[in-house]
Amino acid sequence: MRAFAYAVPMMKLQEHVPLAPHTTFGIGGPARYFVEAVQEDDVRDALLWAREHRVPVYVIGGGSNLLVPDEGLEALVLKIATTKWHTSGETVFAEAGCVLDTLIRNAAQLKLGGMEKMAGIPGSLGGAIRGNAGAFGTEIKDLVTSVRVMNMHTLTISEMPASECAFAYRMSIFKGRPEIIILSAQLRLRQGDPKASLVAIDETIAERERRHIQNVRAAGSYFMNPVAKDDVRHLFEAEKGVSSREGRVPAGWLIEKSGAKGLRVGDAQSSDQHADYIVNVGNATAADVRALAAQIKELVANRFAVQLKEEAVIL
Ligand SMILES: Cc1cc2nc3c(=O)[nH]c(=O)nc-3n(C[C@H](O)[C@H](O)[C@H](O)COP(=O)(O)OP(=O)(O)OC[C@H]3O[C@@H](n4cnc5c(N)ncnc54)[C@H](O)[C@@H]3O)c2cc1C
């Protein structure tokens, strides 16, 4: 039996840890307390410690969809960095801290395909499940069969079938339930040819680079693609010659048409290549990003009467 970890925590508890290096934005002040959970027990130990010391907990993964405040967080930031994984037949069992892109490549080497179009999406498997990450027509929900979770308050662990995860466009049950920590997941892939998979991965990355959505100091698409009224949708469809998916219009298109593309506040800029990306072009602060986002929202609302909602998590 394990000794009670909160009396003598086994995890490494750090203090005053700058969070900017833990985010792709490269923005944000320090965490008062910080634990990098490299094994599942660390998650439990950190939660017990936080409970004993009455400190709030924020969970992060790869930090690729996060805006951390400039003043930092008076909290315990728990970074899920558990990276064990194995396969059985066509099923991959992976811990939540696995880097999604690495998992895709490793699975491909083992003749397991199906995730190639998601190559290059930064961040962890846990973060991808929470936001139902996706690209070029594949979303993580297409592959996940079940998710193992821990409730932050009760510390109970349970297995949730994908049918209970309420996956939808950039959405899952976990978005409204921050007390649920994703520990690991089962993914059903399909038999593939490693060479073909690796070619498909390279093609995906090349396409991402062509669209300038790779390796930028940003949090990915800052706003979700909103459902728009018929007139706005028809305008988009007529101009682009494509039908909108699920009645949604790309936020980037709305931003561009509202004249907000390239707009800059301090060192935060709406990308010239991909307007829905807010990029840290120098030493942007979280305040710069928030001010720019507010301006973009206002311009889009005035032009199209559409309310943009953040996809990035604003802590
Ligand atoms: C250059 C760039 C390109 C991108 N391209 C895409 C793209 O093509 N498609 C796409 O969908 N996204 C894209 N993104 C956004 C981002 O990569 C995804 O949202 C990613 O899945 C976030 O994972 P993360 O581990 O970095 O999460 P984080 O940013 O660390 O956290 C995001 C949220 O998830 C929660 N979370 C993280 N791990 C867990 C866990 N184990 N349990 C419970 N909650 C958790 C956090 O609490 C937080 O609320 C891009 C980002 C960048 C920077």
Image: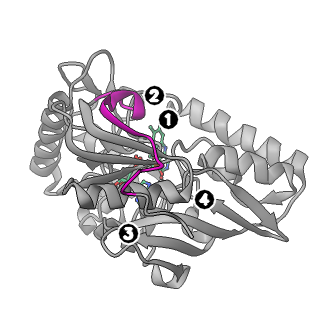
Residue indicated by mark 2: 216
Q: Is ligand 1 closer than 8 angstroms to the Cβ of mark 3?
A: yes
Query: Which quadrant of the figure has residue 64?
Result: top left
- Is disc 2 surrounded by few (<14), some (14 to 19) or many (20+) residues within 10 Å? some
Q: Between marks 2 and 3, how big is the CA–CA gap?
A: 26 Å
Residue type, numbered disc 4: Glu
Dot 2 falls on a residue whose secondary structure is loop
Give the color scheme: rainbow, by chain, secondary structure or one colour. one colour
- Residue 132 drawn at (x, y percent): 47, 62
Mark 3 and mark 1: Cα distance apart in space: 25 Å
Mark 3 or mark 1: name the one nearer the start of the chain: 3
Q: Nearer the viewer, mark 3 or mark 1?
A: 3
Q: Is mark 2 within 8 Å of ligand 1?
A: yes
Question: Where does label 4 land, which residue?
Answer: 95
Which residues lie in the magenta part? Answer: 6-27
Q: Which residue is identified by label 1? A: 213
Which residue is more in the foreground, 142 or 126?
126
The image quadrant that residue 258 belongs to is top left
Disc nearer the start of the sequence (2/4):
4
Would you say 125 lies left or right of 189 here?
left
Residue 143 visible, this angle: no
Where does the image place residue 222, in percent across and percent down from the top left? 32, 44
Which label belongs to residue 134? Answer: none
Q: Residue 236: x, y in percent?
A: 35, 54
Which class describes the residues within 10 Å of circle 4: few (<14), some (14-19), or many (20+)? many
Secondary structure type for disc 1 = loop
User: Residue at image x 66%, y 33%?
Assistant: 206
For the residues marked 2 and 1, what is the alpha-carbon distance in whole angstroms? Answer: 7 Å
Mark closest to the chain's N terminus, 2 or 3: 3
Mark 3 lies on a secondary structure that is helix
- Look at the numbered discs 4 and 1 and tell me whether their residues touch, using CB distance below 8 Å: no
Discs 2/1, front: 2
